[in-house]
Amino acid sequence: MAHEAPFQLLHSELIHYICKTADGENGRSVTKLENMGFRVGQGLIERLTKDTARFKDELDVMKFICKDFWTCVFKKQIDNLRTNHQGIYVLQDNKFLLLSHMSAGKQYLEHAPKYLAFTCGLVRGALSNMGVKSIVTAEVSVMPACKTLNVESEMIYLTFDLGLKFLLRL
Amino acid sequence: MAVCIAVIAKENYPLYIRSVATQNELKFHYTVHTSLDVVEEKISSVGKALGDQRELYLGLLYPTEDYKMFRKLHNSFTDVMCNPFYNPGDPIQSKAFNGVVSGMMVQTG
């Protein structure tokens, strides 16, 4: 992953393709993108953690995602990590790579969910292969900042509001 | 040199299991199953220890095992995971993985 542009372009094309071939069923393309991200996340995390030490606890896992994992995929670290120490984590990226070329304010906000689905799946897949069951949702209030909320729960389902909320519930 | 190699999924079922062809194959399978208990014991006791590279390996279960063997196997497993045609949770059928495992098994006549 030497440069961000190929990944950005591939990602945009992926979204375009999935949405084009799923004309009638709007909600399903977002789910498909999330599932693709899930599978990619699984493989990627195996490669990245091959030589790293065993993680002490969930917070360690989240820190790894925020630093090494995010750096590998997006060439930068997460800007802010918050938690309530009860299974909910909020990751904030103020200049999310996959949205940075779209707009610098509120324009195109309604298209953001499609662009976040793959990344949510990516995080969910990575967590899954580290033994953490989760639901990942993302929220965009002002482009290109993006917040990802992870929550641990027994049920794994993904709900998409038009309010661009992703929620992970464990 | 190994006599039996197994890869166990998170959900405790085998993704891949192979042993040298002998009459006691079933015995090896039982041993693998019971070793899961040892693995779990080691994991729960390792919780407080400092992060260390070798912890992935969990140490020798018997004195004759080899760390290099584990690394080769882990690398091979990572390659299998990254194969887009492989669904996690399916039995492993990759030829390359088979090759690596054969290289590690005891050679018998």
Image (spheres, coloured by chain):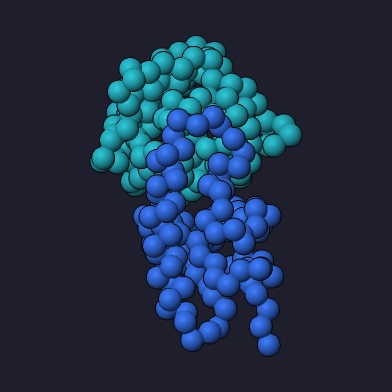
Chain colours: A cyan, B blue
Q: Where is residue A88 in the image (x, y as percent from the top left)?
A: 33, 24
The quarter of the displayed image where residue A167 is located: top left
* Left or right: where A28 falls relative to B105: left
Residue B47, position in %: x, y? 44, 34
Locate residue A12: give its quadrant.
top right
Is A130 on the left-hand or right-hand side of B99? left
Question: Relative to residue A11, is residue B26 drawn left or right?
Answer: left
A144 above or below A159?
Answer: above
Residue B73 seen in render: no
The vertical placement of B35 against B27, above or below, is: above
- Residue projecting furthest to the front: B63
Q: Single out the residue that lies furthest toward the right.
A: A2
Front-lying residue, A2 or A8: A2
- Nearer the observer, A149 or A64: A64
- Judge by depth and name the residue closer to the eye, A67 or A140: A67
Q: Which residue is drawn at 41% across and 30% down?
A: A58
Q: Which residue is drawn at 59% across and 35% down?
A: B52
Q: Residue furthest toward the left?
A: A155
Q: In this view, does A164 lie above or below A45?
A: above
Query: Which residue is painted at 57% across and 25% down in the image?
Result: A67
Percent x, y of residue A44: 57, 43
**Rendered residue at 55%/41% (across/down):** B55
Q: Quadrant of the C terminus of chain B?
A: bottom right
Vertical order, B18 against A109 (above or below):
below
Q: How many marks?
A: 0
Q: Is residue B2 visible?
A: yes
Q: Residue A10 placed where, x, y %? A: 61, 40
